[in-house]
Image: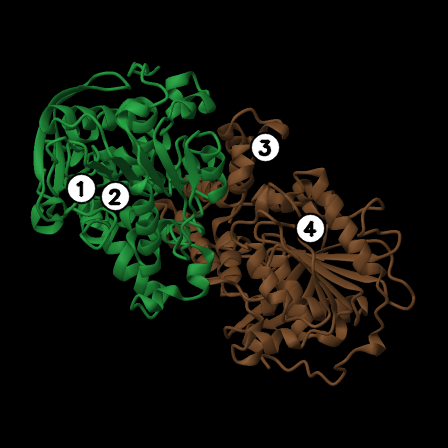
Chain colours: A green, B brown
């Protein structure tokens, strides 16, 4: 397959490719020689107690976290913490369909689950960095799905968790929404069931996929108040054509579909025979649930319902007219709120010895 | 063009095709020999003061109003009122693209505006029925757009207006949403720029269009509470495959696109150089603004903002988990609320002589 420039260090900035070996997949089969693309900032303390894991969202990479969320002026401060951002499998940097040697092989990339990512990340942290306890795991959207999976699956390893704009159990509406995103790509005749030679052939499908994000990714109020003008775009179409469309049309269709399929099925209740309350009851981490006020597909209501099932948790709504894609940090007030909450969460003393359930097994799928 | 059975009286029930002659279009050009498909119930009083105009929404016809909203057990009671339901231009029953004699002609159907419908309806009522004053004009969604257009354009003819789940000025978000609906159809290669021989050729595009409605037409809570099960469908897909997909795949793509283009541009501020407050300030009707609580694209917030600009108006939110497509009357509580509000509105004494502005000109576009 031709190189897709978008996924190179020239575009994404530096990251390290770390092999974690073969990964048995939740859906069956084995993903051979999995490589995780990892960016680290800061220094691991001798006690190995200052590690923060950052997970990535649909289409996202470590770069947006580096640029918007991480820095000495942020809660995720590399002068205090060792911050490990792990690109999710299928995002183009970690092992992904588009890296295959042929279109047929790319189209045959297996289904990946949120649980696969988290198992891979746990192995990476333990074997490569010697980290067995996380001061914090945080992520947005699909990154929140991974944070929840961590807190439920490895409760004795997670001291604190912050789930931004995402849920522990994907909602039916979200499943349908994601399906339309996938349909936009798959319905492009040049997608050819995933056997295209270059992502540029699927430009029309990727463009419609971007437009669909334009409807639901922001909020009704974002458009009504012409918020895009404050971002330097005179018209809606200039904003969509100048921001969202180039963003998504640079990406690989099979990579996006791998993530979308995974997103649709994020669900910690897999560990407890479908019982969400029992799954969330396993969480011992001090947890902040941080929905975005105007999010149209991870609405506050859905996030709040989950938060109420988590013992040591608080609901911290982030006000943002940008809706879900407020995650991009389009407003200064957004990152200020995120920082304020994460600082507060990180300042709460939580000891690895003080966990309520220290006997939790890490049993795979319950 | 082959007959599309969906638009026949066998499917839609009886209606009358009434010629209103040629119609000068707002966008320029003339639509020749316009025929409006009209269903009436009840009897016009000798004083001609009991007429109610019902307008239709995107994809809708008079049939849903007949089946759900009109009857002696409803506020729209044919034993009291003469109820005229006028199918909008382009909906397949009134003059519409698919009635053209060739695919080329169908594809060349001109752009229609909400204002064109309202001008046509006014002419119909005046010339054919001798009606110059409406006891009520009401409609949902695009029907609400028409109700607003009536109240702003012909204030001295409208005593009462009820806008259900729609706005006077289409929002930017709505414009984008509608564009994705249009894209679903237009991106089907067999749509062939509108020059398909039969709507069945565009089934894939129509199916994606239906799926897109499935995401935004209802509400996150509709799906989360599995509301479809109460409607007799076990799974989401059974509901979508058994209800929304057959509903939309029966329709004509060019007809849908004609309505969608019109919907995108509904805006009473055309009459006042873009000044919405001035336009809504023209309304003398007693008006109820009736958004649906869970509507994702005509949210209560947007409807309430317009209501505050209308002098003699009230906001009456209809609670429905079904969201926008609550319009279909999926819940008994929905139609009960609509009836209660419309009964109250109809019971308010409003005299044609007591209007604040009797000097309003009907000047075309202000």
- The reply, left or right, for residue A124 in relation to residue A163 is left
According to the picture, the residue beneath numbered tag 2 turns out to be A59
Q: Pointer 3 indicates a residue of which chain? A: B
According to the picture, the residue beneath numbered tag 1 turns out to be A81
Instruction: Please state the horizontal and vertical placement of residue B322, each as a whole percent of the image.
Output: 59, 41
Task: State the separation of the CA atoms marked 2 and 3.
Answer: 32 Å
Q: Secondary structure at mark 1?
A: loop
Q: Secondary structure at mark 4?
A: helix
Residue A105 appears in the rendering: yes
Tell me whether marks 2 and 1 sit on the same chain. Answer: yes
Q: Pointer 2 indicates a residue of which chain? A: A
On screen, residue B224 above or below B93: above
The residue at 77%/82% (across/down) is: B358
Instruction: Please state the horizontal and vertical placement of residue A147, each as a whole percent of the image.
Output: 31, 33
Q: Pointer 1 indicates a residue of which chain? A: A
Frontmost of labels 4 and 1 is: 1
């Amino acid at each position: 397959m031709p190189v897709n420039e978008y996924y190179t260090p020239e575009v994404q900035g530096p990251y390290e490719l770390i092999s974690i070996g073969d990964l048995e997949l939740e859906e069956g089969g084995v993903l051979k020689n999995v490589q995780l693309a990892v960016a680290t900032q800061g220094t691991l303390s001798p006690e190995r107690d200052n590690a923060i894991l950052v997970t990535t969202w649909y289409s996202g990479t470590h770069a947006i976290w580096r640029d918007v969320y991480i820095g000495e002026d942020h809660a995720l401060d590399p002068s205090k913490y060792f911050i490990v951002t792990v690109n999710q499998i299928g995002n183009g940097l970690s092992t992904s369909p588009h890296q295959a040697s042929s279109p047929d092989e790319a189209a045959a990339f297996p289904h990946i689950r949120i649980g696969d990512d988290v198992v891979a990340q746990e192995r990476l942290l333990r074997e490569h960095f010697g980290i067995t306890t996380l001061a914090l795991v945080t992520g947005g959207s699909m990154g929140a799905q991974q944070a929840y999976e961590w807190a439920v699956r490895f409760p004795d390893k997670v001291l604190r968790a912050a789930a931004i704009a995402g849920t522990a159990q994907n909602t039916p509406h979200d499943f349908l929404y994601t399906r339309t995103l996938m349909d936009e790509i798959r319905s492009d005749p040049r997608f050819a069931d995933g056997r295209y030679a270059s992502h540029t052939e699927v430009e029309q499908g990727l463009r419609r996929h971007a437009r669909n994000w334009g409807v639901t990714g922001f909020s009704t109020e974002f458009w009504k108040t012409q918020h895009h003008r404050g971002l330097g775009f005179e018209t809606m179409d200039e904003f969509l054509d100048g921001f969202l469309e180039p963003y998504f049309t640079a990406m690989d269709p099979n990579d996006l579909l791998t993530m979308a399929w995974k997103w649709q099925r994020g669900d910690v209740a897999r560990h407890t025979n479908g019982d969400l309350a029992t799954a969330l009851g396993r969480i011992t981490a001090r947890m902040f649930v941080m929905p975005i006020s105007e999010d149209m597909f991870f609405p506050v209501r859905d996030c709040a319902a989950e938060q109420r099932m988590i013992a040591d948790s608080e609901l911290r709504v982030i006000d943002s007219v940008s809706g879900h894609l407020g995650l991009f940090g389009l407003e200064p007030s957004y990152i200020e709120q995120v920082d304020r909450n994460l600082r507060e969460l990180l300042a709460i003393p939580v000891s690895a010895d003080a966990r309520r359930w220290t006997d939790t097994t890490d049993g795979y799928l319950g």
